[in-house]
Image (cartoon, grey):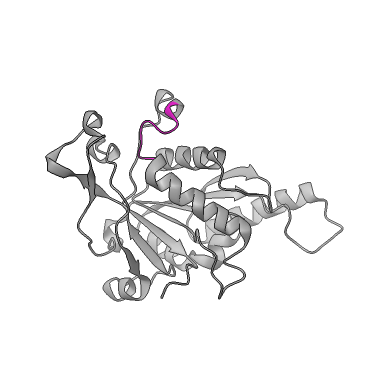
């Protein structure tokens, strides 16, 4: 990956309708909204020495075609969120040879309906279930952050954790949950989903691409990274 790209501080561009994106692409992705996240510096400036200059969003273009996809990062609140929200898209990507990483913020300790299962065991069970489900769609790289199910907030700590994963995975695009409450979908508007959506949005822009955000990441060897697109599940924007 080029350092020029990883140093880019482009601003979010235009949210595009997934129905239109699906017509442009054979993938028929599940997500409702795709944000163009890449940008280029105004006036031809480049490098970190010019970061105080104004940056412009790049020209709106079609979503990445399947043969262009090499690396994808999925960020969700709970085990099984991605299975309900984007498993078909993930299977299509991995079948075409893309490398996909799952980042699961909680272990789903507050899930399930069997009172005979201790909460600690529930976390272990749900991790195992998510790992098995991921394998069915060709994903073997899973990161579990271990935050508490039902208590997720879009804190700086979570943004830090997600920025680190983005810099490690270096994805072309990120799939995550909606940062907004969708009044038409109770499931999509689970507080953990919304908090993770907000933290993921902030991690994609500006945190992961900004060398001055969480500078300890840079000094630890994790270079800034700019994802080209952010795909949103369950946004309700049609």
Residue under the point 57% across and 67% down: 188
Q: Main secondary structure of the magenta part?
A: loop
Question: Is residue 33 left or right of 190 when viewed as pictured?
Answer: left
Q: Is residue 122 magenta?
A: no
Q: Indicate the position of residue 52 as horizontal and vertical percent values.
A: 26, 34
Q: Nearer the viewer, residue 193 or 103?
A: 193
Magenta span includes 211: yes
Which residue is nearer to you in this view: 81 or 98? 81
Q: Is residue 79 visible?
A: no
Q: Is residue 171 above or below residue 129?
A: above
Image quadrant holding the C terminus, namely bottom left
On the image, the x and y values in percent for residue 226 come to 33, 44
Residue at the image position 45 percent from the left and 26 percent from the top: 216
Residue 205 place in picture, x, y as percent? 38, 46
Q: Quadrant of residue 31?
A: bottom left
Whether residue 82 can be seen here? yes
- Residue 212: x percent and y percent? 38, 30
The span picked out in magenta is 208-215
Q: Point out the residue furthest to the right here.
A: 116
* Residue at the far top in the pictured view: 219
């Amino acid at each position: 990956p080029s350092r020029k790209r990883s140093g880019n501080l482009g601003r979010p561009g235009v949210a595009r309708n997934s129905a239109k994106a699906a017509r442009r692409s054979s993938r028929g992705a599940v997500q409702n909204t795709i944000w163009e996240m890449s940008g280029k510096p105004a006036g031809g400036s480049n490098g970190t020495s010019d970061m105080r200059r104004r940056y412009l969003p790049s020209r709106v273009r079609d979503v990445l075609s399947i043969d262009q996809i090499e690396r994808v990062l999925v960020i969700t609140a709970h085990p099984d969120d991605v299975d309900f929200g984007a498993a078909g898209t993930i299977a299509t990507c991995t079948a075409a040879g893309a490398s996909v990483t799952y980042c699961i913020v909680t272990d789903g300790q507050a899930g399930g309906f069997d009172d005979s299962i201790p909460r600690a065991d529930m976390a272990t069970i749900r991790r195992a279930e998510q790992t098995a489900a991921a394998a069915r769609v060709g994903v073997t790289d899973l990161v579990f952050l271990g935050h508490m199910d039902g208590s997720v907030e879009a804190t700086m700590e979570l943004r830090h954790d997600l920025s680190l994963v983005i810099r490690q995975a270096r994805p072309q695009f990120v799939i995550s949950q909606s940062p907004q409450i969708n009044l038409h979908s109770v499931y999509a508007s689970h507080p953990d989903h919304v908090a993770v959506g907000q933290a993921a949005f902030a991690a994609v822009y500006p945190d992961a691409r900004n060398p001055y955000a969480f500078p300890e990441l840079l000094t630890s060897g994790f270079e800034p990274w700019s994802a080209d697109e952010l795909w949103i599940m369950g946004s309700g924007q049609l």
